[in-house]
Image: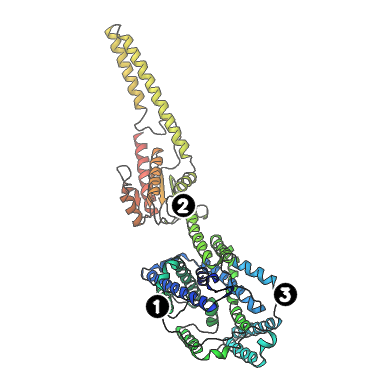
Amino acid sequence: MVGSVAESLVTNDNFTLPGNDSIIDMDARDKARVEVVAALTLLVGIFQIILGLVQFGFVVTYLSEPLVRGYTTAATIHVTVSQLKHIFGLPLSEKSQPLSLIYSLISLFRRIHNTNIGTLVVSTIALLCLFAVKEVNQKWQSKLPMPIPIELVVLVISTGVSYGINLHEQYGIGIVGNIPTGLLAPTVPKTDLFFQVVGNAFAIAVVGYTITISLAKIFSMKHGYKVDSNQELIALGLSNLTGSFFHCFAVTSSMSRSLVQESTGGNTQIAGSISSLIILVIILKAGELFTALPKAILSAIVIANLKEMYKQFMDIPALWRTNKYDLLIWIVTFLSTICLNLDIGLGVSVIFGLLTITFRTQLPQYSVLGQVFDTDIYRDICQNTMTKEVDGIKIFRTSSAIYFANAELYAQTLKAKVGVNIDLLIEKKKKAVMKRKRGLQKVITLAQRILSNTKKGSGLEFLMNKEAIVGSLQTLSETIPNPPTLQSLGLERLSFHSLILDFAAVCFIDTVGIKMLKIIFEEFKDIEVDVYLVNCPGSILRQLQSSRFFNETFTPALIFPTIHDAVSYLSQTHESSSLQEVTAI
């Protein structure tokens, strides 16, 4: 990412020599690119420090383990492909755009016939030695006083052989070459370049942090320690801020180097400190000792240490058996990172991970609960044969929050689970009420006609008709309770009188969910079913109160702390009501 920014802002066209457009002033061009990179790195460091101070590290919570493992597996393939040109000794250019991995492989296979045989032989021997000794280290770990430092041994031997035989001149094997020694004097990066790189700087700051925290999470899970995401962010920012004054480019954790250090037993900050001191010595004085080191050896060491990362492909069958959502996150993260590169692939992966959360809450698990025999425990009647529904009471549970994305589905599933077509029953009741009203209106109209006709007759006849009509109207009105019941309208009563909504798993409810909940209360009240809430968290109760959910009809008395409390109360209340009805009869 850093290189693409430098190349896009500082092109070759601006540094051609006067009078000859085919010759480029490489020194001037590289100096200008270094200035751009230094300014970019300074901005990256500032962004990371600011983000760390404002606790931006919380975003790591959205990097689930399947996402991190899918991302690092794809990054492993990117690293492997980037090293193949040194393994085969092919001069391939670096690419950073989307599908760069595919383009790199195509370029590799097109030029595979130009493979440097000497380089391939050196790479193969190094890989065989590395894999063999690593297997020995792993198999005889308990008997060895310390792991055999095969990487160091291979480096020393290959450098000596390359220098003695002159592999570069004799067989055309690529070597590290001249390593400039010493450090440049610190300078302040050009601030006038900030506006040109500010957007890229923020993107690099986020991507660099994500790569670092992803590797940190992998190693922390493996070795059992905790990672402070904000501390990592600030440390990364300070590294970039300081490095920008010494013409360094933006840094992040190196997967290959981290795996090499971890595989050789370096698990503490002491190992990092010693490694840094050795690199400093090499930069200052010992650089010429590694001039003859074949690049193929370095690539072989990197690839050999990626073996453990490739084992993460075994996550696929494990996730297939346990959780299809996590498997989908792993695969989408892997494919998007492979195809779209590390930066865009990361963004796509995080967005997809957030979408799966929406899908999971939008399509939660709904269940009707029954009482486990002779206990106060209630479980899903479809998954437990030891449960039985409480007579006259339906208990409904959801496994998710209730909000705009699933509120309507919650109501629809509730109506389907209780086994009654609520909407049809309400419609029948409305039609029955309207029919009764029309019948009553006809009687009233007929009575008015009779009374108007009898006024012309004798006074006695008028009074007798009036008393008869008034008595009939009174009898008719008494048959229609206010409000009318299902039984009085000739409709069949439901098999249950109470509905309990278990909110134990409801972590929040928004305004749309509250409105839908109120509609549920009103509709079931209309068909003579009382609705109760149980296991409501305090936050849900506060939301209901602030939204003015409660009124004279729906009071806080409809809320119980547990399912069993509500069942016990409703069972006793219904038994008392039934006994009073029998006594009245």
Q: Give the vertical position of 271 relative to 9 (above or below).
A: below
Q: Give the vertical position of 386 relative to 146 (above or below).
A: above
Residue 402: x %, y % from top left: 42, 52
The amino acid type, in three-letter code, at marker 3 is His
For mark 3, what is the residue?
Answer: 113
Q: In the rendered image, which quarter is residue 125 located in? A: bottom right
Residue 416: x %, y % from top left: 49, 44
For mark 2, what is the residue?
Answer: 369
Q: Quadrant of the C terminus?
A: top left
Check residue 188 in the rendering and tell me which mark sits there, or answer none. Answer: 1
- Any part of residue 287 in sight: yes
Residue occupying image coordinates x 36% and y 17%: 445
- Secondary structure, mark 3, is helix
Q: Nearer the viewer, residue 31 or 374?
A: 31
For disc 2, the neighbor class at 10 Å (few under 14, some 14 to 19, many from 20) is many
The amino acid type, in three-letter code, at marker 1 is Val
- Secondary structure, mark 2, is strand
For disc 3, the neighbor class at 10 Å (few under 14, some 14 to 19, many from 20) is few
- Any part of residue 60 in sight: no
The amino acid type, in three-letter code, at marker 2 is Leu
Most distant residue in the front direction: 19
Residue 15: x %, y % from top left: 53, 73
Most distant residue in the bottom direction: 164
Find the distance from the CA under tag 2 to the CA under tag 1. Answer: 69 Å
- Secondary structure, mark 1, is loop
Find the distance from the CA under tag 3 to the CA under tag 2. Answer: 69 Å
In this view, the mark in front (3 or 1): 1
Q: Give the vertical position of 213 relative to 377 (above or below).
A: below
For disc 1, the neighbor class at 10 Å (few under 14, some 14 to 19, many from 20) is few
Q: Give the vertical position of 86 relative to 403 (above or below).
A: below
